[in-house]
Amino acid sequence: MEKLTLTPHLNEIVVNNGAADGAVDVFSYTPDDTASRPLGSISIIGYRDTDSSNMGYMVSLIAALARREYYAQPGTPPREAFARTLRKANEVVEEFFRNGDVALSVGIVAVAGSTLMVSKLDKFKILLARDEQVIDVLGNVALFSKEHGEHRCFSSVIHGSIQPGDRILAFVPTRPVTARERTLKTWLMKMPHAEFAERVAKVGQEHATFATAMLHITISQDAEPAAQPSPQPRELLPETPVITPKVHPAPAPMQASMAWAPRQQQHIPDAAPAAPIARDIPRAIEPEPEMPRIISSEFALGIRRNLLSRWGDRIRFIRFDKRGKAVALGMATLLIAGGALGVRSFLFTNTEEQAAKQVLTDVSRDLELARSKTAQNEPSEARQILTRALSALAGIDHENSTATALQATIGTALDEIDNARVVSASLVAAPQANDPVPSLAAWASASQTIWVGGISSEGTTWAAAVRDGAMSTRVEFGALKADLLLGWRDGVAAIDLANRTIARSVGGVIKPYTIPTQEALQDAVEFADSIYVLTDTSILKITDLDTDKPVTKQWLTKNSELVTGAERIWVDGTLWTMGRGGELTTYYKGARTSQNAAPLAPSGAWRLIGSPDGLLSVAQGDARRLYLLDPKTAQLDHTLKIESDQPFVSLSVGPDYSTLLVAKDGRVWKVQ
């Protein structure tokens, strides 16, 4: 019998490694043993800017780490092994980016059986040729689903099924490669491995600046013999008669079979040579069976007594008179109560509680580390550690006394570092008894109106204008799951970043608009009747949104102008972006003009907002602080500490460059 299996055939293509535009690398690994075969192959494709750092070993380091972690536990399911690999890789990547500003793009691709798994750091692309069409794997949600994990840099796992005849091409979309992407798609559908590689190499010979590392995979279906039935144990085989020969030669030395676990196996020295046997002995000498050795850790003389057995002995000899019945009833009550407490402890110590305990342990460790950084006169590092710790505590129930105490301690430590000035927030709106709880807020300058909104219990998005401290009639956006609210004309616009959709309210009518891009959206801001959208690879500008035919175009003159890791955007004539590492970048007329590192690392709920005095405000919801930066140097000018008994889940710009803050309980505040 035969069984059909899918076999990936991998071909690495490297052209002009170390060219002026960047250095490229590709590493592919396959299982070394039969036990690891279900995990399939794993490949790492990387690109780094040659001018950004001298740490040229980074891609190879990630590759070596990925190989070690992916095949570390052969019995693990592929998806679990892949997720564990990303967690380990992120520990290295996070420290790497914290110590330097490097343009680095890495893609990790694993093929296990009929499953394709992909994760990326910054720019990466993977194409799948199937049924005379080419599919963008990272942008096709119908065939490939995305699972968000706990990873900070390799932020998600994209996985889906592959079929016989599929052709896959993975690469980093540098500018020279992107310019030839249409040609590459044509070659991918028609050419085998060798011819495809020759064509790409020819392009590299004709253009010295063309540098790329590609992984070309073809999937074939092969037949292999099915597993044969395993041999039966000797005890189950039919008995056969034993014929004793007339001449009995000396028996070979016997070796006792091992019946214990491998951890207890010991080296058994070779048996001494047998003594010669006299020829006049009429029968062969039968060796005496070896007595099994008793291992003290496995056997004990007598019966092991435990608590239950001792109680059982006592119950056996109880005289069931009035006193005996009372003793038996008391013992039964104790057993039932203890069992109930044990079951309760086992069942109700759920995953969330265990995760909360781990977070508290990590935060306590971070607090000690921050104190040591402060003692070493490194306030910036200490501030970054403390703000990340506050973000981690934001997800724990506010009734947890340990978390509350840690928040107070971290707040005190931040006050010492920031020398913050306390400011009071004014209440803008509070949900009434029958109102939904807001989680978003926005300011519409055209109508001078504050809007609040959120996700209803049915999973739909709603928004309402605030009139005299109360919410007016709600606007329903349907199945859209908004991440942002932006004031738009005399109404409001809701943005679903995951689905690349903007829905705006025009004259009471909801009009959705899908942004024509496959890039992952990070943030958006409104300026001068246009919406600027920050993606993971570029900046887009959307105009004519109040018409039936909005226009989306690239705002950057070159995609390479965008700094890696940008997550927030602010536009006020000049455009700024900022990432979690604190990199503040300035752009003007589609080009990057400056880049500086701020002495903080925002995390959790945070925004980049302008201020009336020309500074930039980094609003940190978990820390309940506004860090005011000089936009030219990114140096900290001063810090404002907001008086609040709970962190803020959403922040946005308000009237006159104020900051709108939405608390956990849905109350909306304003800080001027």
Image: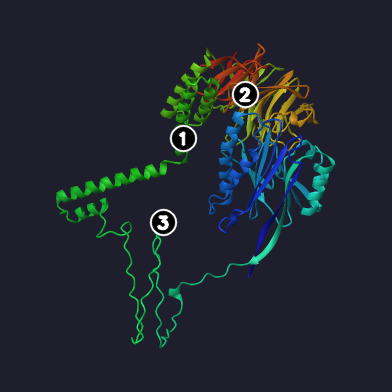
The disc, 3 or 1, on the residue closer to the chain's N-terminal end is: 3
What residue lies at 17% left-to-right and 55% top-to-bottom? 317
Position of residue 400 in the picture relative to residue 461 (left or right):
left
Q: Secondary structure at mark 2?
A: strand
**Which amino acid type corresponds to the residue marked 2 in the rendered image?**
Arg
| Neighbour tally class for label 1: few under 14, some 14-19, many 20 plus, Cα within 10 Å | some
**Which amino acid type corresponds to the residue marked 1 in the rendered image?**
Ala
| Neighbour tally class for label 3: few under 14, some 14-19, many 20 plus, Cα within 10 Å | few
Tell me: residue 47, above or below residue 438: below
Q: CA distance from mark 3 to mark 1?
A: 36 Å
What residue lies at 26% left-to-right and 56% top-to-bottom? 304
Q: CA distance from mark 1 to mark 2?
A: 26 Å
On the question of residue 488 being in view, the answer is no
The disc, 2 or 3, on the residue closer to the chain's N-terminal end is: 3
Residue corresponding to mark 2: 607
State the quadrant of the C terminus. Answer: top right
Residue corresponding to mark 3: 263
The disc, 1 or 2, on the residue closer to the chain's N-terminal end is: 1
